Image (tube, grey):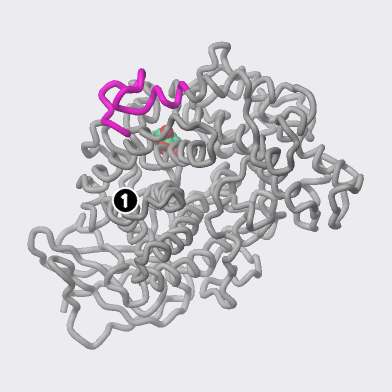
Amino acid sequence: MRFSLLSILFGLGSVASVWGQTNTAEAFFASESPIAKTGLLANIGPSGSKSSGAKSGVVIASPSRSSPDYLYTWTRDSALVFLAIVNQYTLGLDNSLRSQIDNYVGAQKIQQQVSNPSGSVSSGGLGEPKFHIDLSAFTGGWGRPQRDGPGLRATTLITWAEFLLTQGNTSYVTNELWPIIKLDLDYVASTWSQSGFDLWEEVNSSGSFFTTASHLRSLRQGIRLATAIGQTSVVSGYTTQVNAVLCYLQTYWDSNGFVNSNKGGGRTGKDANSLIASNNLFDAAAGCDTTTFQPCSDRALSNLLQYVDTFRSWAINSGIATNQGIATGRYSEDSYYGGNPWYLTTLAVSEQLYNALTVWKAQGTIKVTAVSLPFFQRISPSASVGEYASGTATFTTLTTAVKTYADSFVSIVAKYTPSNGGLSEQYTKTTGAPTSATDLTWSYASVLTALDAREGVIPASWGAAGLTLPSTCSNSGGGGTGGGGGATVAVTFKVSATTVWGESIFLTGSIAELANWSPDNALALNADNYPIWTVTVNIPASATFQYKYIRKYNGVKWESDPNRQFTAPASGSYVINDGWR
Ligand code: NOJ
Ligand code: NOJ
């Protein structure tokens, strides 16, 4: 029998007695979670039964060899799957997973060093999205770079490291884990403001909410780890970037009540991207904080409702009442495999709501604001703006309605899960038959994380609680005003520079977006058009700043004085053509 942290804390005994009698969601999790755990482990090398050929600790996305070929390892999928594993182990839910975690660490240490089409370890290669399962580089065309991978991996490894510190294993953390983590954090600190592909590998834009969220959490948690093990030289640089990232995160909020997930791509922006991000940013200690889009924040709830509603027109959802769970996918314009519901996105809805319930119950109060009112009224028509303490009838009414609504999405997944429990990536929007990749590792992980959330499991805090939005954010839309997209302009820096083999060109300057003159966190330029080196950076509109290029090769070499100076245009984009001097 599994016990939730909350039920242990409150002495309430088994989960079933907390939440009431068996229902469809409960029955689904009871039968599906062992299948999901087995299915997940089958996809991890070296001995997973469906991942032969995968190196030790390598997570395959799926064993599918064609339509689609997913027999690769993605940094994102692997980090998310292993965050679930690390949480299960460190929270005492499954003590059998330790060697898997050690293997993952070993695999990531190797993978980081593999030069690939995005670059080498020191020139952007950490942003490469996927590798062959023997950890060699994948050199075919792909949407690269994807800048979420390093932050997600750092978060998984930091969470593991912080647990090991509580066990007194400081030397392993300092000598083995920290060097791996620091590479990823340095990458995040120096590239977060650059353009890249979103988690769905389709939109190349100046920002994607999920990706920015991964930057925020990893740097914030990284500062805490660095401080704990005395690696204080990174603290001030990372702190500057955390503040800038937190500002940038605010710019995705659309005052019409949703997160506009991508800075480009021409879509509504209502996207599972943002729900998965909220779950990744979940930190019960932060309560229903809005700036970090906590699962129970008014913004995240309003966003959830608007996201769900974009899928109502699918045949599979016809006739379902609007206060009931439906099948949901990545985003409504999706056409990949025809554009269908995904198991992991439908479960992300439930997971967010279960996480929200955990916080409301722990803090003993639930708040309805003007922003979250449409969400609450949908599932409880008489809801009105106010704050309701536990013990009041309204608290019970609202939390019961949220629980029922959350379970109803699980019921949809249960309905379209085949009888052997195997989970593909998608189920069709017409009949609900499984489609696309079979046995998707991430689908299985989403069952485990949704179940943990339902049981009130509280993952370790990552430091969201102590974060405050800087009083001024250079991007408008930050600063707590909640306005639409931030006023940034894409400035492309091009510099002609001949280099010797192994030498790379970087950029730094006087503003946070250019790493505040830090050679360590300077932005890597790419040499696709050598000898022209290029990087595109989103810079606050109209900002005046100074900058220089630097060379890195056995140390740092700066351009000669004086500093270069530039004023970003008020809108649009701009290309600067420089020659090394
Ligand atoms: C393959 C990627 O894996 C997927 O995310 C994307 O949706 C399709 N290409 C279509 O662009
Ligand atoms: C396509 C998904 O869009 C992407 O997020 C994922 O990393 C790959 N498939 C592999 O599962």
Percent x, y for residue 348? 60, 38
Left or right of 154, for residue 244: right
Mark 1 and ligand 2: say if the CB distance to the nearest ligand atom is below 8 Å. no
Residue 204 visible: no
Residue 188 visible: yes
Residue 493: quadrant of the picture: bottom left
Q: Which of 328 and 230 is in front in this view?
A: 230
Q: How many marks?
A: 1
Q: Which of 439 and 453 is in front in this view?
A: 453
Left or right of 273, for residue 132: left
Left or right of 422, for residue 114: left
**Residue at horizontal 50%, vertical 28%?**
444
**Residue at horizontal 46%, vertical 36%?**
85
- Chain part drawn in magenta: 38-57
Residue 529: quadrant of the picture: bottom left
Residue receiving disc 1: 172
Does the magenta stretch mainly form a helix, a strand or a loop?
loop
Left or right of 502, for residue 184: right
Percent x, y for residue 342? 55, 30
Residue 48: within the magenta?
yes
